Image: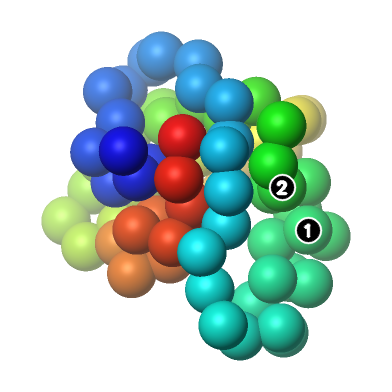
């Protein structure tokens, strides 16, 4: 299941990041978004979702959310 399909308020463990873009992978890693890390979906918005990773909250678009497998 991808982050886009996650239920709001539940904690998940990131299984993998599925992208061919090295720059995007590096960006996600800098946010603390990598395999084995805990992530919580705070809310789903039209075209994006708000996630909590470590001590930060981020708004990511649905295309990026579909690259994050939980």
Q: Are marks 1 and 2 in contact (CB under 8 Å)?
A: yes
Q: Residue at x 33, y 69 (%)?
A: 63
Q: Residue at x 78, y 58 (%)?
A: 29
Q: Position of residue 23 (x, y in %)?
A: 72, 84
Q: Position of residue 66 (x, y in %)?
A: 34, 58
**Which one is in front, 61 or 20?**
20
Q: Secondary structure at mark 2?
A: loop
**Which one is in front, 46 or 39?**
39
In the image: residue 27, left or right of residue 49: right
Which residue in the protein does label 2 denote?
A: 34
View extreme (right): residue: 30
Q: Is residue 11 visible?
A: yes
View extreme (left): residue: 46
**Which one is in front, 40 or 17?**
17
Which residue in the protein does label 1 denote?
A: 29
Quarter of the image for residue 21 reads bottom right
**Count of marks placed on residues:** 2
Quarter of the image for residue 7 reads top left
Q: Position of residue 46 (x, y in %)?
A: 16, 56
Q: Earlier in the sequence, mark 1 or mark 2?
A: 1
In the image: residue 34, left or right of residue 12: right
Q: Residue at x 58, y 36 (%)?
A: 14
Gap between marks 1 and 2 measured at Cα: 6 Å
In the image: residue 41, left or right of residue 33: left
Could you tell me which quadrant the N terminus lies in? top left
């Amino acid at each position: 299941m991808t982050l886009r399909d996650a239920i709001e308020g539940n904690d998940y463990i990131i299984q993998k990041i599925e992208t061919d873009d090295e720059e995007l992978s590096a960006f996600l890693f800098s946010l603390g978004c990598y395999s084995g890390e805990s992530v919580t979906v705070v809310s789903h918005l039209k075209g994006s979702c708000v996630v909590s990773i470590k001590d930060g909250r981020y708004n990511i678009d649905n295309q990026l959310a579909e690259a994050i497998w939980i």
